[in-house]
Image (tube, rainbow, N blue to C red):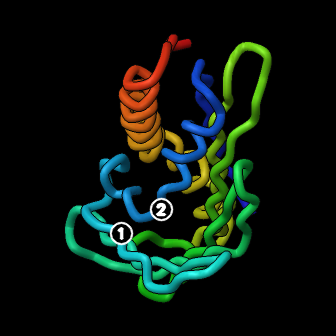
Amino acid sequence: MYTLKADRLVKAPAAIVWDVIADVERYAEYAPNLSQVVKTSEGPTPTRRCYDVQGRGWNEACILWEEGKRYSYIIDTSDYPYPFVQMKGTWGIEERPDGVLITMRFDYHPKGIWPLTWLMSRALPARFGPIIEKLFDNWEAEISKRVLAGGSYEAV
């Protein structure tokens, strides 16, 4: 199993940061590689169907929801457009004295045999790093907009 992690520190109230990153139905508005996210079930662990910008879709099931802290989705890789046997994404926030740290973690197992899986794990940050940074930029812009509507905001 391999892991890809990223984080961003923002100076904003944790409640606003959580409201933005936990709005799973609006995820495609922030993620540049997605065209649509459709919530397919309700409840404490909702499922969703995601579509990339080429129209390819896959299902994701929420396996963890800790309100105000973090959530995780496991991806059904049977129709996933990327070569993974298994993939899980976890998004969260952590309050710190200097702001709120937004975290993203993807645990994945590529299809194939070693050393191909190892090579893929080395290439993944270059491929998805810019996508993750744009997602953070878009989240931060939305957080800024919401904070400015009701208070102060300072980018870190």
- The spot of residue 108 in percent (x, y) is 65, 64
Q: Is 138 displayed left or right of 61 in the figure?
A: left
Foreground of the two, 74 or 121: 74
Q: Quadrant of residue 142?
A: top left
- Seen in the picture, residue 112 relative to 7 is either above or below; the reply is below
Question: Marks 1/2: CA distance?
Answer: 8 Å
| Residue 37's disc number | 1
Tell me what residue is drawn at x 68 percent, y 60 percent.
Answer: 71
Q: Quadrant of residue 6?
A: top right
Tell me what residue is drawn at x 42 percent, y 85 percent.
Answer: 79
Foreground of the two, 26 or 49: 26
Mark 2: few, some, or many residues within 10 Å (few <14, many ≥20)? some
Which amino acid, by three-letter code, is at mark 1? Val
Element assignment for label 2? helix
Q: Is 88 displayed left or right of 25 in the figure?
A: right
Foreground of the two, 27 or 58: 27
Which amino acid, by three-letter code, is at mark 2? Val
* Residue denoted by label 2: 24
1 and 2 marks in contact (CB < 8 Å): yes
- The spot of residue 1 in percent (x, y) is 75, 64
Foreground of the two, 58 or 101: 101
- Who comes first in sequence, dot 1 or dot 2? 2
Q: Is 38 displayed left or right of 24 in the figure?
A: left
Spot the residue most to the left: 54
Tell me what residue is drawn at x 62 percent, y 28 percent.
Answer: 13
- The spot of residue 111 in percent (x, y) is 57, 75
Instruction: Specify whether residue 32 is in view.
Output: yes
Element assignment for label 1? strand
Tell me what residue is drawn at x 33 percent, y 78 percent.
Answer: 57
Spot the residue most to the front: 150
Instruction: Specify whether residue 112 is in view.
Output: no
- The spot of residue 139 in percent (x, y) is 43, 37
